Image (spheres, rainbow, N blue to C red):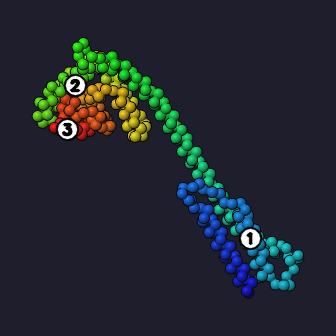
Amino acid sequence: MSLVVIGLVVLQILTSGVALYLFKMSRRENNSEIRPYDQFYVGLVACAFGLSMLFVFHVFVSPEFDVSENLGQVGDFVGGLTNPVLSFIALIVLLRTTLIQTEEARKTSSIMLEQQQLMKEERFESTFYKLLERYEVAAGTYLRLTLPNDNLTHAQRMLQRLRKRRAEFDGMDLKKALPLLKPHIKSEFQLDKIKKTYARAWKVFDFIDGSGLPEDRKQYYFSVFNDAMEPSEMALLITRAFTLKKRRKKLRQYKPGRLVKFQIFACSAIGMYFGGMVKES
């Protein structure tokens, strides 16, 4: 019986070693890739288990047992114990292989998504800069010109006229000021050339806001849009958006008020609504 005990102990140690090895192989260190099982160790485990079955058979069989005349019984005994275990090992290896293939498929899918996103942004940039160029051409023709004997551009003069009633509007409740403020602002955008210029500006903004890009990328392209505009032009865009409900809600998300001086607006409420932080002393 001592040999039987030794055999069982050896088998238990072997089983524990296999379990520890499989556990170690299943763990990831520092987000490392899943590694396949070592073929040598898998084969070694299978051979060791087969030999252990022969050892158990040898322990339990009587000395009078003639192996050569009872090969069928030997095969049934060893095969009946070994086949399930070897099948289980094969299943574990198969599951591991499937896991690796799934992980690789996920990586491939992630790379494809990144490539699609990159291509999408490249197409976006191509159209974006074309729209931006069209706006700059219009702005250079209509908003950035200076009149004879005048140091201010047409856009700066528009803001100057809008600020003439700033004290009046700031001294009123906003609900009372709005019915007077809207026509006051709208009057500066009646000329066809001004309408045309800001229609192009809105096309640029709508293209940014309506894109499927992440929010941080939208913010980036909005900053590019802002850099292409003079401060007075952005202030006029913000001022006009304040009178348009849908426009002001969308534009507010980008906090454009922080990009221009608080005092430049026709009313303090405009700067506060669009994220302006610097107040007049």
* Residue 36 falls in image quadrant: bottom right
Q: Quadrant of the N terminus?
A: bottom right
Q: Is 133 rendered above or below residue 25?
A: above
* Residue 154 falls in image quadrant: top left
* Residue linked to disc 3: 279
Instruction: Quote the CA–CA distance across marks 1 and 3.
Output: 82 Å
Q: Residue furthest right?
A: 69
| Residue type at numbered disc 2 | Leu
Crowd around label 1: few <14 · some 14–19 · many ≥20 (10 Å): some
Which mark is nearer the camera, 2 or 1? Answer: 2
Indicate the position of residue 37 as horizontal and vertical percent values. Answer: 66, 60
Q: Answer yes or no: do the residues labelled 3 and 2 have beta carbons within 8 Å?
A: no
Residue closer to the observer: 96 or 148:
148
Residue at 25%, 14% in the rendered image: 147
User: Mark 3 or mark 2: which comes first in sequence?
Assistant: 2
Which mark is nearer the camera, 3 or 2? Answer: 3
Instruction: Quote the CA–CA distance across marks 2 and 1.
Output: 89 Å
Indicate the position of residue 168 as horizontal and vertical percent values. Answer: 11, 30
Indicate the position of residue 103 as horizontal and vertical percent values. Answer: 58, 51
Horizontally, residue 81 falls left or right of residue 64, namely left
| Residue type at numbered disc 1 | Ala
Residue closer to the observer: 83 or 92:
92
* Residue linked to disc 1: 48
Q: Is 109 rendered above or below residue 171?
A: below
Residue closer to the observer: 234 or 97:
234
